[in-house]
Amino acid sequence: MSPPEFALLFTTVAVGALFQVSIGFGLGLLAAPVIAALDPSLTPVVVLLLATGVTAAVLALDRGHADLRGAGWALVGRVPGALGGAALVAVLPARYLALLVAGVVLAGVAVSLRGFVPRPGRGSVLLAGLVSGVMGTATSIGGPPMAMVWQRLSGPALRSTMSGFFLAGSLMSLAALAATGSVHPDSLRYTALLAPAAAIGVLLARPLSSRLDTRRTRAVAMVLAVASATVLVVQQFL
């Protein structure tokens, strides 16, 4: 990876971490397409490792607001989803995995823009956890299903509930990926190199969160995600 490419990735991770802390998701939506475009072999492990640290930080900062019961049912669904996602990573060639990342990003944005608001009952939370497990393990983008089912929660409750779910869920996904041999030394090296970018995003998000309009921030995240996914698709076909 060239220095300009790494600089782009570093910036994307910092911005993605800022969105993750501010609105509860965003790191995977922004960083996964860029990583897949630059080096598909790093998908999805690097984003999952970075997300583990970012969500742990959010959970520590917003502790006490999490819906533990809802997060628990979502994690029950996450278990079979993580196994299915790990199987996809093991069998899909890098090009098709990159296209899957782009497709998941575009589908997640489309669902979010439709404004569908499901009732956050046990069944819907279980199903969202299952879908999030497959998507999150295969592509590192598991936020949209959970954001959709928990969108009625208040800001701190949304951030802490999603962070608790993603912290445990990311560890599940990483364990499943490690079992299939998908975690390799390059993934660990790039995670260490990009960890400062994630830390910068977390540190910037706290003082900026009171000044950010949540709806506009979410809209910006969606636009950037669509742009990244579009570039990724074009690159694969060229």
Image (spheres, rainbow, N blue to C red):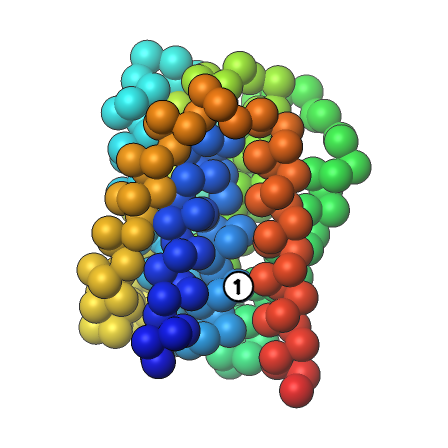
Work out whether residue 210 or residue 20 is closer to the camera in this orientation and state it.
210
Q: In this view, does 117 lie above or below 221?
A: above
Q: In which quarter of the image is the N terminus?
A: bottom left
Neighbour class for label 1 at 10 Å: few (<14), some, many (≥20)? many
Residue visible at 30% across and 18% down in the picture? 63
Residue 134 visible from this viewpoint:
no
Image position, residue 106 (x, y; %): 68, 55
Q: Mark 1 points at which residue?
A: 33
Residue sticking out furthest to the right: 114
Q: Quadrant of the C terminus?
A: bottom right
Going by the numbered disc 1, the residue's amino acid type is Pro
Residue 113 visible from this viewpoint:
yes
Image position, residue 230 (x, y; %): 67, 66
Helix, strand or loop for disc 1: helix
Q: Is residue 4 above or below residue 81?
A: below
Image position, residue 216 (x, y; %): 63, 32
Q: Is residue 152 above or below residue 188?
A: above
Residue visible at 23% across and 62% down in the picture? 193
Image position, residue 30 (x, y; %): 51, 54
Residue visible at 68% across and 20% down in the picture? 119
Q: Is residue 119 above or below residue 21?
A: above
Which quarter of the picture shows residue 99?
bottom right
Work out whether residue 90 or residue 237 is closer to the camera in this orientation and state it.
237
Residue visible at 47% across and 39% down in the picture? 19
